């Protein structure tokens, strides 16, 4: 009997040891799980930096790696951030990046990882895509969709931020928007490469190569084609009082050296602007006058290349588009600006033209018939008889008799409280 009791005690002791061992293992597993979860705060996101992406660096581009915690006062929770970001010498670029980081941090996600990729072209341009991934918990396994991205583009030789309008002509942007059925705001720059640009047009990636689009670029680099012959002219917008009367004087068939300058001087005296619908071949002949019009703040529209009668006698749609493109390229080469308005010669209409081109077709409300009368007093009489607030008035600056009439009319309408505006300004205010 004693022998049996002793054996039972031994078996019970072993069982107790086994139970204690299992409990210890469970405790170790639980503690390990908490330890692993806690490690995320210091290591899991940081581990993503263990194999950094290959980057092409330019001389003033450095990298900032940070992993840190911040306490959220509202929830009393600790939030974790892992940042792998460029550091810019350009203050505007750095400000935009800092604002983006603060915007992401304001979401108060449990964990946030911000990383970037970059590429350079011609040792001058660099594209950055900064991507923020936020997590709903601390284990880094449940990212909140969608990711948020910020894109920045820098021209290092000029030390400035650039955008799509610093790369391609507005005419090309309008055409891309028209072709894809979207607004120009949906045509975005995505990447600058040595073969061309990668654009995002209405959410779709579009390759915009240098060779295939050689008349469309405005970038100052010997490797990128450009038809620009002069320095680009920058024109500042101005304030127009929508509650005061306004009139848009327009002038066809120029530029006409001497005459055109007199009109600009008369406008300058009253702080006015006008629109000049010019012929392409005369733009080529008198480039200084074209530039003077633009520098004054007045507007240039297209009136075709040479005012051919073909516009009235069977010009095809393809011929009309080619004519307009030719004039647009001439004007751009002289000013760095793109034409946005077109007045057809003789007021002619070609089927489907307005649906095909990016320029807005402009006619007139008041025809002074200065081309017919060639009489200063009659031009003044016609204008005063029919002009009203918001009217587009037609003159021709090639006729010497028109110029004194315009000078007197500018004085007269200024005394009546009228503002002299461009057609584009008039359309923006009156909604035409």
Image (cartoon, grey):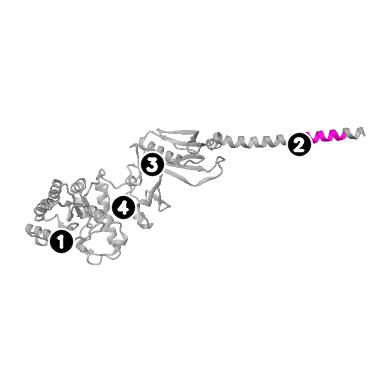
Q: Name the spot of residue 221 as percent of width and height, x first.
A: 34, 41
Name the residue: 39% across, 50% down: 208
Residue 250 percent location from the top left of the image: 18, 55
Query: Label 3 vs label 1: CA separation?
Result: 48 Å
Which mark is nearer the camera, 3 or 1?
1
Q: Earlier in the sequence, mark 3 or mark 1?
A: 3
Q: Which residue is mark 3?
A: 153
Q: Which residues are magenta?
A: 7-21
- Label 3 crowd bin: few (<14), some (14–19), many (20+), radius 10 Å: many
**Nearer to us: label 2 or label 3:** 2
Neighbor class of circle 4 (other Cα within 10 Å; few <14, some 14-19, many 20+) is many
Give the camera-side residue of 225 and 414: 414
> Total of numbered circles in the picture?
4
Mark 1 — residue?
Answer: 367
- Mark nearest the camera among 1 and 2 is 2
Q: Name the residue tied to disc 4.
A: 171
Q: Is residue 259 above or below residue 372?
A: above
């Amino acid at each position: 009997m004693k022998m049996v009791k002793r054996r039972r005690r031994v078996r019970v002791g072993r069982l107790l040891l086994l139970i204690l061992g299992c409990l210890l293992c469970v405790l170790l597993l639980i503690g390990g799980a908490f330890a692993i979860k806690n490690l995320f705060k210091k290591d899991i996101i940081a581990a993503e930096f263990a194999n950094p992406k290959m980057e092409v660096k330019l001389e003033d581009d450095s990298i900032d790696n940070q992993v840190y915690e911040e306490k959220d006062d509202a929830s009393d929770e600790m939030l974790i951030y892992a940042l792998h970001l460029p550091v810019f010498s350009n203050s505007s670029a750095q400000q935009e990046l800092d604002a983006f980081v603060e915007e992401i941090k304001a979401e108060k996600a449990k964990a946030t990882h911000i990383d970037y990729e970059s590429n350079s072209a011609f040792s001058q341009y660099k594209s950055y895509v900064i991507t923020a991934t936020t997590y709903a918990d601390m284990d880094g396994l449940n990212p909140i969709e969608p990711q948020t991205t910020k894109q920045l583009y820098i021209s290092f030789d000029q030390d400035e931020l650039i955008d799509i309008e610093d790369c391609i002509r507005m005419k090309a942007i309008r055409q891309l928007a028209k072709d894809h059925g979207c607004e120009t705001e949906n045509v975005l720059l995505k990447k600058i490469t040595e073969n061309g640009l990668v654009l995002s047009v209405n959410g779709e990636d579009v390759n915009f190569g240098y060779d295939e689009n050689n008349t469309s670029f405005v970038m100052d680099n010997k490797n990128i084609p450009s038809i620009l012959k002069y320095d680009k002219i920058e024109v500042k917008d101005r304030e127009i009082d929508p509650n005061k009367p306004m009139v848009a004087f327009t002038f066809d068939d120029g530029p006409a050296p001497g005459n055109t300058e007199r009109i600009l001087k008369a406008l300058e005296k009253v702080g006015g602007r006008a629109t000049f619908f010019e012929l392409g071949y005369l733009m080529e002949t008198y480039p200084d006058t074209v530039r003077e019009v633009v520098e004054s703040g007045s507007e240039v529209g297209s009136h075709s290349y040479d005012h051919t009668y073909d516009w009235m006698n069977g010009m095809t749609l393809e011929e009309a588009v080619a004519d307009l493109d030719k004039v647009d390229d001439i004007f751009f080469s002289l000013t760095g600006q793109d034409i946005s308005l077109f007045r057809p010669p003789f007021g002619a209409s070609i089927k489907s033209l307005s649906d095909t081109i990016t320029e807005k077709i402009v006619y007139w409300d008041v025809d002074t018939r200065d081309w017919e009368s060639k009489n200063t007093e009659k031009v003044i009489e016609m204008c005063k008889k029919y002009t009203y607030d918001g009217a587009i008035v037609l003159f021709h600056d090639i006729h010497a008799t028109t110029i004194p009439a315009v000078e007197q009319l500018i004085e007269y309408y200024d005394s009546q409280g009228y503002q002299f505006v461009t057609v584009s300004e008039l359309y923006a205010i009156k909604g035409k």
